[in-house]
Amino acid sequence: MNTKILSTTEYDIALAGEILRSGGLVAFPTETVYGLGANALDEDAVRRIYVAKGRPSDNPLIVHIARKEDIVPLVTEVTPMAKALMDAFFPAPLTIILPKSDAVSDVVSGGLNTVAVRMPGNEIARRVIRAAGVPIAAPSANTSGLPSPTKAEYVIDDMMGRIDAVIDGGDCQYGVESTVLTLATDTPTILRPGAITKEMLEQVIGAVNVAPAVLEGMAENETAASPGMKYKHYSPNAKVMVVKGDSRQYRDFVNTKKDAYALCFEEDDVAIPHIVYGKQDDDLAQAKNLFDALRRLDKMGARRVYAHIPHIDGVGMAVYNRLIRAAAFCVIDLTKPFAIGLTGQTGAGKGYVAERLQARGFNIIDCDSVVRDIYDTDADLVQSLAAAFGTDVVDNGRVNRSRLAQIVFEDREKLATLNAMVHPAVMNACRKMARFPCVLDAPQLFEADAQQDCYIVVSVLADENTRLQRIIDRDGIDEASARRRMSSQYSRQYFLEHSDYVIYNDGGDIERQIDDILAEIW
Ligand code: TXA
Ligand code: MG
């Protein structure tokens, strides 16, 4: 197919209207992003949209109208709330969802009994719809999964030869797609944030909910918080990671990266190749530049992109929502004291993994030695241990560790009391010692509830016989004691369920497993 490139002259707009009326596909500018239009009343034409985009057929399309009253035949009823919103905002970057009439085909609604309707604010878009004389179904004019196009150039990149025409109407004003608001729920709910913000909507219709998927967006049936393994959208070819932290933390982090690009704010004085997508507090600029920046990064050949996290107020919610999807939900959290919480089964070789992380530039805090240290030096702790377990657990102001071990050995209640006293003291000491980037090497990480202080948790596991032999060799104890030590720990299943990543240390390539994890989340 030969894709015509049209201008915004009367002649070209009339031609676009003609193409649409006769079942063709025309991409046109809107104030949000470019849309890929077809006659919404022509099922065959609408099917062609799904083919051209490679879009799953159960993802419904927005029907675009040029006049408010054109919504009437598309819905069962224009509710008072819908009317209030249309009067306040239309034409606008706002899409409202209402129960659909029979005029709207299942092909448009993706089989749902509702329809999404929007009257675009862009004059060229409305001229095209008027020229066609029919409502226009139009998704964003990108290949499904890629960033939405904010310039005709990007539509051409994706759609050349696949559609009848593209109207070049320059850059889009907002750069992120419309706010999608469903009125088909008890409380109106934002399904996709955009330039018409929650606050703006609430001024007109009262309370508005935000669908949980907008900010969290965990894939269905996903339970564990494992960055990098989730549904991806708006993504460039480059791997995008969102970085949470202030300007200094962000800069210090990205400046250590090789062969990487930054997608940053004007204030973030970074030293690696980068694109600025606005000032830190200018969410409109960020929205306008985001998709364009993602496409440009691909053209620059970026393989890894570190994007500084936007705030989520106002239009920032739309920016954040698109960016975390482009990043497949990988958010590197530099605000946690520890980058990695390293734990695992005794004898699995956690210490070796810690060493290999140290060789990669991480600062290691060894909790075992912190415990020994505070037993010797933390006078408050020593005093409370004496109060709880008797004065013979203290020698010369220091905790007598073997005496204490004897007391809690095989007395679960006493052990729990001990842990409740020691773990907070250890964690306090560790937090004070933490120097970025830090690994917390903690055999009792879960017992101490330290996960919340770690960006990710990595457990080192190995099969039972391997661990048994290692413990016997390492600690010079007999098999029965080694087994007792092993059985006092959480199960393999527990570690699997509570860790973001697992390293298997029974003969596999450790370096490679570490590199793979770091490549994914760091
Ligand atoms: O700004 C925009 O809205 C752009 C321009 C071209 O108007 N269009 C756009 O369309 O972004 P699209 O197809 O890329 O996104 C439409 C979104 C999808 O997330 C879709 O699932 C949702 O709206 N949607 C459409 N109809 C729906 C319905 N009946 N119920 C729930 N969600 C619906
Ligand atoms: Mg889209």
Image (tube, grey):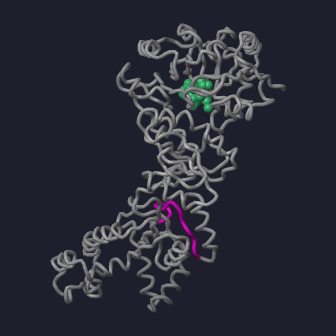
- Is residue 209 visible in the rendered image? The answer is yes
Is 462 or 352 nearer to us in this picture? Answer: 352
Q: Residue at x 54, y 66 (%)?
A: 502
Residue 382 position within the rendered picture, expressed as x and y whole percent measured from the top left: 21, 79
Q: Can residue 111 be seen by looking at this rendering?
A: no
Percent x, y of residue 486:
44, 78
> The magenta stretch spans which residues?
495-505
Residue drawn at the location 63% of the way across and 77% of the way down: 507
Say whether residue 283 is magenta. Answer: no
The vertical placement of 343 against 216, above or below, is below
Q: Position of residue 385 (x, y in %)?
A: 20, 77
Q: 225 and 356: which one is in front?
A: 356
User: Is residue 249 found left or right of 127 in the rendered image?
Assistant: left
Residue at position x 51%, y 83% in the image: 468
Q: Is residue 499 above or below residue 97?
A: below
Q: Quadrant of the C terminus?
A: bottom right
| Quadrant in which the N terminus appears | top right
